[in-house]
Image (cartoon, helix red, strand yellow):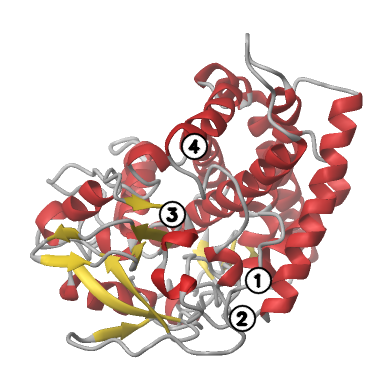
Amino acid sequence: MTRPAPSPATGSSPGAVTGCPVIALDPLVRDLDGEAVRLRDAGPLARVELPGGVPVWAVTHHEEARRLLTDARLVKDINEWGAWRRGEIPADWPLIGLANPGRSMLTVDGAEHRRLRAKVAQALSPRRVESLRPGIERITERLLGELTARADAEEAAGGPPRPVDLKAAFAYPLPMGVVAELMGIDDADLPRLQELYDAFFSTQTPPDRVLAVLGELAELFGRVVEEKRANPGDDLTSALLLADDGGEPLTVEEVVNTLQLMIAAGHETTISLIVNTVRALLNHPDQLALVLSGEIPWETAIEETLRRYSPTSHVLIRFAREDVEIGGSVIPRGDALITSYSAIGIDTARHGADAESFDITRATPIRHMSFGHGPHICPGAPLSRLEAGIALPALFERFPDMALAVPDSELRNKPAVTQNDLYDLPVFLRPPVDSSPGSPR
């Protein structure tokens, strides 16, 4: 995710898509659920217009996505994109930083991808992830202690309870604290990191600002890498800098890009997973009761949330090296493809006629691909699940009567077309007697 090369174009627009209906993705993400339904119904392969007027294909059904994500004819090299080569992608395209973030394991394939990914897999081995459990539990307990102190103070004052933004007070600082410990990042850098990533993912950030964000991120992680080269520790950054037996270490640029990618993919996913699970359960108190009683395990609630409310709504971007036929349609050579996980999660062929419902008791097995599939499957998925599996039970054990402080319809998604991410999650930790839950979602 270092500063990308500029787009070949200086302002031209891609040609209009003809021959089939086109679904324009809303850059403000005002109706993510409705958009997911439209994409699913247009699938398995839908024609989509990304913010900025760029046409791509979107795979929106589970089985077709599973096949395409393992098809070697679809590659990550942006130079295989015909519109890019022809200069049809505007220089001011709002998603240019996401589509061309620089060289990392996200943007390469084959042997080069395996080389970069192998280092991350070693650093995120099951043993290493499990070793983070005490730290996750410690951070969780600290954050819950702060929330408890706040609730106790309000009760002692005798006034009505005030809403707490659970995202800002709990769902955000937990994974960021874990990331800091995992990668050896100074806690003082975390607020600025969040500001930079918010700007990077937002479709409202001007492209020149995105380039500046990428430059600042590269500088910040460059300092982390240099510190770990001089003073290695028991952290992921130090592990990435080590050479394999008989092999070469990653370059400084490769380590910097890997760190940027892992934080972008890792902490945002976990934040959204925690927020979306809390939101879904508060909107379905009968299902929450099943989890709190132990009748349904927390793991099931987490996996159902991942299926129905995937933290990542769309993943950019693959390019057809040759014609690829799927589901009765053909992705022509040189065309681009995105993976629409928000639609894939409600594919009725995979999840049943009630796929749009959040239901932890569903009869169909909860199998999803919200962390991806194939060679580029998210290597941080076990860590995200571990964090949610520790944080959510502890949160509801401390505040079993927690309730939404506003109707669900008032909750707003951030303008990040690739993310299922709320601005905030206002809740009452200890709700007043006359409080009413939000409308079911």
Is residue 263 in view from this perspective?
yes
Contact, CB < 8 Å: mark 4 with mark 1?
Answer: no
Tag 4 residue: 113
Contact, CB < 8 Å: mark 2 with mark 1?
Answer: yes
Instruction: Residue 235: give its label.
Output: none
CA distance separating discs 2 and 1: 7 Å
* Relative vertical location of residue 381 with respect to residue 331 in this rendering, above or below: above
Q: How many marks?
A: 4
In this rendered view, identify the residue nearer to me: 88 or 1: 88
Q: Earlier in the sequence, mark 2 or mark 1?
A: 1
- Mark 3 or mark 1, whichever is nearer to me: 1
CA distance separating discs 4 and 2: 28 Å
* Relative vertical location of residue 77 with respect to residue 46 in this rendering, above or below: above
Tag 2 residue: 91
Is residue 284 in view from this perspective?
no
CA distance separating discs 4 and 1: 23 Å
Residue type marked 4: His
Q: Is residue 115 left or right of residue 309?
A: right
Instruction: Residue 277: give its label.
Output: 3
For disc 1, the neighbor class at 10 Å (few under 14, some 14 to 19, many from 20) is some
* Relative vertical location of residue 192 with respect to residue 130 in this rendering, above or below: below
